Image (cartoon, rainbow, N blue to C red):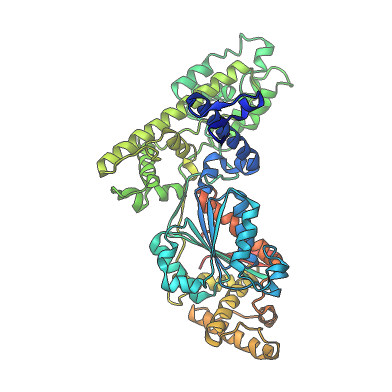
Amino acid sequence: GAVKGHCVFSPLAFEAGALYPVGDSGAVCVCLLCVVLNMAEDKAKKYDRQLRIWGQHGQAALEKAQICLLNCGATGSEALKNLVLGGIYAFTVVDDARVSPSDLGSNFMVEKESLGQTRAKCVCALLQELNDSVTGSFVEERPETLINQNPGFFDSFTLVIATQLHEAIALKLDALLRQKGIPLLLARSYGLVGYLRVSVEEHTVIETKPENRLEDLRLNAPWPELQHFASKFNFNSMDDAAHKHVPWGVILIQAADMWRSSHGGDLPKLGEERKQFKATVAELRRHYDEENFDQALANVSKVWSVPVVSSELSALLNDPKAVELDKASSDFWVLVAALKEFVQNAQGCLPLNGSLPDMVSDTESFVEMQAIYRKKAMEDAASVGELAARICKQVGRTQTTGDATSDPEKVRLFCRNAPFVQVVRTRSLEAECSGGSCKSELLQSMMTREDTSVNTTLYMLLRAADHVFADFGNFPGTFESHLDEDVARLKQVASALLADCGTTHAVLPDDLVGEMVRFGASELHCVGAIMGGMAAQEAIKLITAQFVPLSGGLIYNGMTSTTTPISL
């Protein structure tokens, strides 16, 4: 709708030639409703593909995110481009450089007419054209200046993406943002080498979205309502059509009951007994073409392969933050504490997921069985919610509307994903880069292993190049006349870094040292696009709290098209 003079035009009424006075509140409501519905429909179309991946709540998190980008060369522009297209709320570009001829060959976010203008202004303008729902701004300042002189500048940002920063500045920025609790994402393109690093004190993930999930159907220990449902199916009295449509879950529950009755209440154990149990299931079959029995035989292991509390989840349940709660504890840790108590009360069982896989069945039976599973899952989630409320009361923590501990839907989301929740804690850059705290044994291993030696060497050479820059004011390979000198200097500095980290037997191949010098700290678009894409992917993980982000760093080798995680 739109206001013109003293009248309101309603999109629906306007088609019929109707014109409502402003004073008609009903018409205004209709008009506003139409606008809201149209906006929602447009958003669903605009972000259709990504909504299928991280859902409406993930998109809502993106639409609240305010991103700060430090340096908008090829790498930074590509990263921010992907986030702008994804629908973040706002971004701020910090860069004092002016567009140079080299930018025209590597950065699609500047134009020929931009030569000599500030890069931040040009990139900001073109990025905003990609998505008019996103607010963009720029600051024509060196990132180092803001880090050193105006640390409060970063307070309002959800995430900081820093590109093309050398080690000394990155160390200062990491220490600053860790004090503020703001995640940092470092991205770098250096010739045909790329570097990505996530730095966050603590990042909790409920929706980790693992590729392989063991379905929790409780076929080994059905609760009373499920047991009663399964017992209603009388295989002997039903006709062939009904026999073909018994859900395979019911077949296995009844087969397990038969087995227990003749084996002292125990389920099949390893080896021969499991073969015998499978034969028991097969004996219940009437005809060879009964697909439901094919499914039962294919899923027979679900009778004894039941989900258990993994060692990773057990460590999380016993994490000090889940044990030593106080009024400042986050929703996540309150829910973890509630989950721990639930598991203890349920003899080691996690809350039921509630999902039911596809089964050959008549519609009525499947719908009834599905309803039973959903009801049990909601009851388990309600129990976790009650435990969370009691814990909040015990520690003096006030529950407010929208808290994950008090919102039934958010509690159910937590319970559905309970087996796979994770906490990511990365080491600080200072801990990684300091010789006294570097993981020297791991570094030594990675430098000598065939599958990791090349990329780990590139990581150390990249660090050495930063040290050369800090000491001499130029990166190795900047001047063609000094190439031989730079090769020797880079190798010497890299060897000193390795020795400082306690790694004395590693070999620095001359060809890799020569390549790093030949790169001359250039930022190529092909590498920048790859690193920008990966940076945007990690940024979305951090913003939406879905999928598991890097637990440290990663090196990309453009010469071999390989990546290696680096968490030292």
Residue 280's x, y, as percent?
61, 24
Task: Tell me the residue at 53%/80% (across/down).
Answer: 498
The image quarter containing residue 214 is top right
Task: Tell me the residue at 40%/40% (across/down).
Answer: 404
Q: As rendered, which of 234 and 65 lies closer to the eye? A: 65
Residue 263's x, y, as percent?
50, 26
Q: In the drawing, does residue 385 fall left or right of residue 90?
A: left
Residue 373's x, y, as percent?
50, 26
Q: Quadrant of the N terminus?
A: top right
**Would you say residue 564 is visible in this rendering?**
no
Q: In the drawing, does residue 556 fall left or right of residue 419?
A: right
Say above or below: 84 vs 481.
Answer: above
The image quarter containing residue 289 is top right
Say above or below: 355 vs 194.
Answer: above
Say above or below: 491 vs 212.
Answer: below
Q: In the drawing, does residue 12 fall left or right of residue 467?
A: right
Say above or below: 455 vs 43.
Answer: below
**Would you say residue 322 is visible in this rendering?**
yes
- Total number of numbered discs in the rendering: 0
Q: As rendered, which of 293 and 130 lies closer to the eye? A: 130
Residue 536's x, y, as percent?
59, 56
Q: As rendered, which of 239 and 327 lies closer to the eye? A: 327
Task: Tell me the residue at 32%/39% (across/down).
Answer: 399
The image quarter containing residue 434 is bottom left
Task: Tell me the residue at 53%/86% (across/down).
Answer: 471
Which residue reaches farthest front?
Answer: 5
Q: As rendered, which of 422 and 163 lies closer to the eye? A: 163
